[in-house]
Amino acid sequence: MATTGMGVSDECLSLFQELKRKKAHRYIVFKIDEKSKKVLVDKTGGAAESYDDFTASLPDNDCRYAVFDFDYVTVDNCQKSKIFFIAWSPDKSRIRAKILYATSKDRLRRELDGVHYEVQATDPTEMDIHVIRERAT
């Protein structure tokens, strides 16, 4: 049976701080390691990477968590940035993985202080760039 309350690795937290404070990463993708019972960093995207690069980095048949630093310009021509937490649970993923990720999400989400918005997606249309832009502005 799925274990709830997975721990969060120190690397997850330190890379998130780098994304938030230093803009060192555009995105971070996290995965659950069932053996260590921890959320680990799966991959990161450099500051110059796009939203398309981010979505392409997500598996189409397994769950992941991710944070994405979305930059945009307001109607007043001000440069802004919002951090999105994305819970990716594609329809093609195993039921066990969906349950594990659903029951472990809150712990990671609480640890990532500074996230502005949360998006849950089961297919790419639910986290399309237009959805992200609409939520941010």
Image (cartoon, helix red, strand yellow):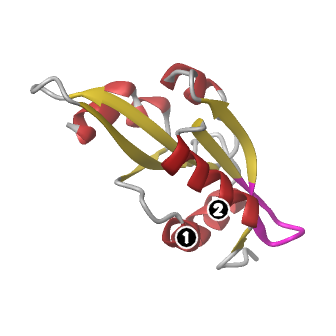
Question: Looking at this view, is 132 or 44 the one in front?
Answer: 44
Q: Does the rendering let one see residue 69?
A: yes
Labels 1 and 2 touching (C-beta < 8 A): yes
- Our reading of the magenta stretch's main secondary structure is strand
Q: Mark 1 or mark 2: which comes first in sequence?
A: 2
Give residue 42's position: percent from left, percent from top. 75, 45
The magenta segment: 31-40
The residue that disc 1 covers is 111
The residue that disc 2 covers is 13
Give residue 56's position: percent from left, percent from top. 62, 24
Q: Is residue 3 above or below residue 52?
A: below
Residue 27 sits in which quadrant? top right
Give residue 26's position: percent from left, percent from top. 55, 34
Which residue is situated farthest in the left direction here? 76
Task: Give the residue type at disc 1.
Answer: Glu
Magenta stretch containing residue 110, yes or no? Answer: no
Q: Is mark 1 on a helix, strand or loop?
A: helix
Q: In this view, does 11 lie above or below 56?
A: below
| Residue for point 62% across, 65% down | 99
Question: Looking at this view, is 3 or 67 the one in front?
Answer: 67
In the rendered structure, the answer to whether residue 81 lies left or right of residue 5 reads: left
Q: What element carries label 2?
A: helix
C-alpha span from label 1 to label 2 = 7 Å
| Residue for point 83% across, 66% down | 34
Give residue 95's position: percent from left, percent from top. 66, 57
| Residue for point 64% across, 62% down | 13
- The quadrant of the picture occupied by the N terminus is bottom right
| Residue for point 73% across, 40% down | 43
